[in-house]
Image (cartoon, grey):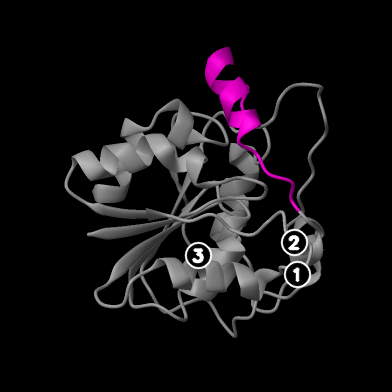
């Protein structure tokens, strides 16, 4: 099976690399995409183009989107032969919704507590490296609509991290049920389960 891994805001293919390695060891083809998030001229259409240009023609793919990558992933699913769409700690967009409106539309209510909301569960050396691989996230995609008329007509799963401080589990359970009509699956780890527990999401993706 070919997996297409889409990163979240400011993230890169590096943030998928432990899961990429696990999937390759299990005999799968993996394409981990870098989005042009540091390009101020690039918006959601350019993000979609970056994914499409990375995927060779032929055969079904499993599209896996992390966090804000859910917006890109939903649009990609209209353009590729998709066997399954998997959201990992993913934002679920409504048709035509803008990222900048998603927070209020979903009732997101997060309070800064002074801790690292991204990498707090990782060993310090891994967290340091993960921060080093972050790119600047430009603002243009935030004001652009998710160009779908309805949710993609493909099998969809969603998985959340039980220790996620950015998207707390209670919020993600409610948001996923309201937007997709089913409860998300739950894995150990925080906002980046692919860094903290890579074998677990790899097994989940191939189950």
Q: Is residue 171 left or right of residue 200?
A: right
Left or right: where does residue 168 sit relative to residue 60?
A: right
Q: Nearer the viewer, mark 1 or mark 3?
A: 1
> Horizontal placement of 177 versus 32: left or right?
right
Q: Going from the N terminus, do you reach mark 2 or mark 3 first?
A: 2
Image height of 66 relative to 42, above or below: above
Q: Residues within 10 Å of mark 2 (few under 14, many from 20)?
A: some
Q: Which mark is residue 98?
A: 1
Could you tell me which quadrant the N terminus lies in? bottom left
In percent of the image, x 47 and y 31: which residue is there? 195
Q: Residue at x 74, y 65 (%)?
A: 141
- Asked whether residue 125 is drawn in magenta, I would say yes
Q: Residue at x 65, y 45 (%)?
A: 171
Residue with the most extreme bottom position? 149
Rate crowding at label 3 as few (under 14), some (14 to 19) or many (20 or more) other CA atoms within 10 Å: few
Nearest-to-viewer mark from 2 and 3:
2
Residue to which mark 2 is pinned: 102
Please give the range of residues in magenta. Answer: 119-137
> What element does badge 2 sit on?
helix
Work out whether residue 170 or residue 138 is closer to the camera in this orientation and state it.
138
103 in the magenta segment: no
Circle 1 SS class: loop
Instruction: Provide the residue designation for mark 3.
Output: 181
Is residue 71 visible from the viewing direction of this image? Answer: yes
Q: CA distance from mark 1 to mark 3?
A: 21 Å
Q: Residue 184's spot in the image, x, y percent?
A: 47, 50
The CA distance from mark 2 to mark 1 is: 6 Å
Q: Nearer the viewer, residue 85 or 110?
A: 85
The first of marks 1 and 3 along the sequence is 1
Q: Is residue 101 visible?
A: no
Q: Are marks 2 and 1 in contact (CB under 8 Å)?
A: yes
Q: Position of residue 23 (x, y in %)?
A: 27, 44
């Amino acid at each position: 099976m070919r997996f297409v891994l889409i990163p979240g805001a400011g993230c890169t293919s590096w943030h998928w690399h432990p899961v990429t390695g696990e999937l390759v060891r299990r005999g799968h083809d993996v394409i981990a995409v870098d989005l042009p998030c540091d390009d101020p001229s690039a918006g959601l259409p350019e993000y979609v183009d970056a994914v499409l240009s990375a995927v060779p023609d032929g055969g079904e793919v499993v599209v896996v989107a992390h966090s804000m990558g859910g917006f890109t992933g939903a649009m990609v699913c209209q353009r590729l032969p998709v066997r399954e769409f998997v959201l990992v700690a993913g934002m679920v967009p409504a048709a035509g919704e803008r990222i900048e409106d998603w927070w209020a539309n979903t009732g997101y209510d997060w309070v800064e507590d002074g801790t690292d909301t991204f990498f707090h569960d990782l060993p310090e050396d891994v967290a340091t490296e993960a921060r080093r691989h972050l790119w600047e996230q430009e603002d243009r995609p935030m004001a652009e609509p998710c160009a779908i008329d309805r949710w993609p007509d493909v099998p969809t799963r969603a998985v959340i991290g039980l220790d996620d401080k950015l998207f707390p589990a209670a919020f993600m359970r409610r948001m996923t049920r309201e937007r997709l009509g089913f409860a998300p699956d739950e894995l150990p780890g925080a906002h980046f389960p692919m860094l903290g527990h890579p074998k677990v999401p790899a097994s989940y993706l191939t189950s």
